[in-house]
Image: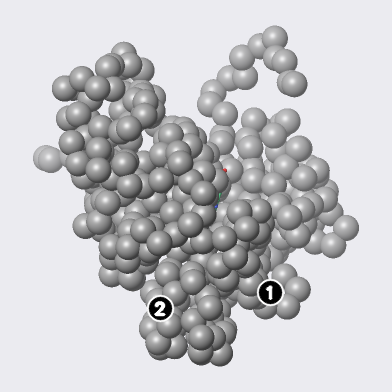
Amino acid sequence: MLKLDFHPAGRHFLQIPGPSPVPDRILRAMSYPTIDHRGPEFGALGLKVLEGIKKIFKTQQPVVIYPASGTGAWEAALSNTLSPGDHVLMFETGHFATLWKKMAESLGLKPEFLGLPGIEGWRRGVQPQMIEARLREDTQHAIKAVCVVHNETSTGVTSDIAAVRRAIDAAGHPALLLVDTISGLACADYRHDDWGVDVTVSGSQKGLMLPPGISFNAVSPKAIAAGKQAKLPRSFWDWTDIIEMNKSGYWPYTPNTNLLYGLSEALDMILGEGLDNVFARHERLAEATRRAVRAWGLEIQCADPAVYSPVLTGVMMPEGIDADAVRKTIYERFDMSLGTGLGKMKGRMFRIGHLGDCNDLTLLATLAGCEMGLKLAGVPVAASGLPAAMEWLASQPQTTSLKVAA
Ligand code: PLP
């Protein structure tokens, strides 16, 4: 473990695609004293966060909050709706889709992994027409669920969930739609109800700007009905008692009180800024990042501009250059953390996170650190990316105004 005998001046730049930096306002809210989770004060907090979080998922249905990381909420989504041996259709978009598929196998489900050849799926995201074609073949309706990742944190590709819904409907197939938006929520537009999603899985440590430790399942009436027949073993993850007790703002076990204080503050911040402003801010920072990467002469991992992620940008390294060596240089020289390449992309790319509590100047400092680090690590850089990013940001109106009245 790295042990420092000095305090590095300034703030660490945590530019991985989650956990994202936690704003001081949220850290302070989390430092309130822990209270009785069965007392009256807690009930008010519980009701506030349970109601508020629905606005972020754009749902009128229950959102279950677990004291767990996102992986737990993945398991909850599968174990509450499916039975041993059930066939599920998943799409290979990247490392996280692969991990969810492995989990499905270990729970005794039979996942089928659709995908494009090689790493194409890791560069283009979900292909709804492939899902439709596969569901049309399944005339006996053996497939019980379609599982897709909305924002693949390992690649920087965002898939079109509304199009997946249309594909399922076009095939006339009754499969449930389960979606992971662990890194997409509160960064990219997401509509649990309008898109007919049955279970949406998310987590605290990305767009919600909280530390890791709570995760979510937004559930449709169809998912709740499926749960009544689902035979996978579950106890802690079972929705039934949680949803019942949540009606009065409480949980059947000890909830994560201080993280819920943080969630309450995060909801005030996000809804105060306005969800559409939050999405537009992410889009504009992402575009500035891509302009810088192109000016450097480097390739963006996402190969289809229609599905560029507003959350993070994957930067491919030229042949023969180890992306992790570049990250190490940047960490050691500039106290900045960037995301490592995961799974099939290990060593071939790094990921720049531009999510959560990030603004123009945070992003420019991040890009400056990347640019200096690339040069120090010996990566050929065609031109400076900073002017390209700065011109873009200066040319675009701010998503929210700090204008002082005259
Ligand atoms: N799914 C996606 C898209 C993720 O980005 C992550 C974590 O980064 C996970 C699942 C797993 O979540 P956790 O690490 O919180 O268990």
Instruction: Give the colour scheme shown.
Output: one colour
**Nearest the eye: 47 or 23:** 47
**Nearest the eye: 51 or 352:** 51
**Residue sitting at 79 percent across and 52 percent down?**
347
Mark 2 lies on a secondary structure that is loop
Mark 1 lies on a secondary structure that is loop
- Locate the N terminus by quadrant: top right
Image location of residue 253, percent across then percent down: 36, 29
Determine whether, in the image, residue 330 is placed left or right of residue 153: right
**Residue sitting at 63 percent across and 67 percent down?**
110
The residue beneath circle 1 is 120
Specify whether residue 300 is in view. no
For the residue marked with disc 1, what is the amino acid? Glu
**Residue sitting at 39 percent across and 51 percent down?**
217
User: Depth-wise, is mark 2 or mark 1 nearer the camera?
Assistant: 2
The residue beneath circle 2 is 174
Q: Residue furthest left?
A: 406
| Residue 92 position by quadrant | bottom right
Image location of residue 203, percent across then percent down: 45, 45
**Marked residue nearer the N-terminal end (2 or 1):** 1
Determine whether, in the image, residue 178 is placed left or right of residue 64: right
Q: CA distance from mark 2 to mark 1?
A: 28 Å
Specify whether residue 369 is in view. yes
215 is higher (above) or lower (below) than 62:
above
**Residue sitting at 20 percent across and 41 percent down?**
247
**Nearest the eye: 324 or 101:** 101
220 is higher (above) or lower (below) than 373:
below
Q: Residue furthest right?
A: 320
42 is higher (above) or lower (below) than 147:
above
- Locate the C terminus by quadrant: top left
For the residue marked with disc 2, what is the amino acid? Pro
Image location of residue 362, percent across then percent down: 48, 41
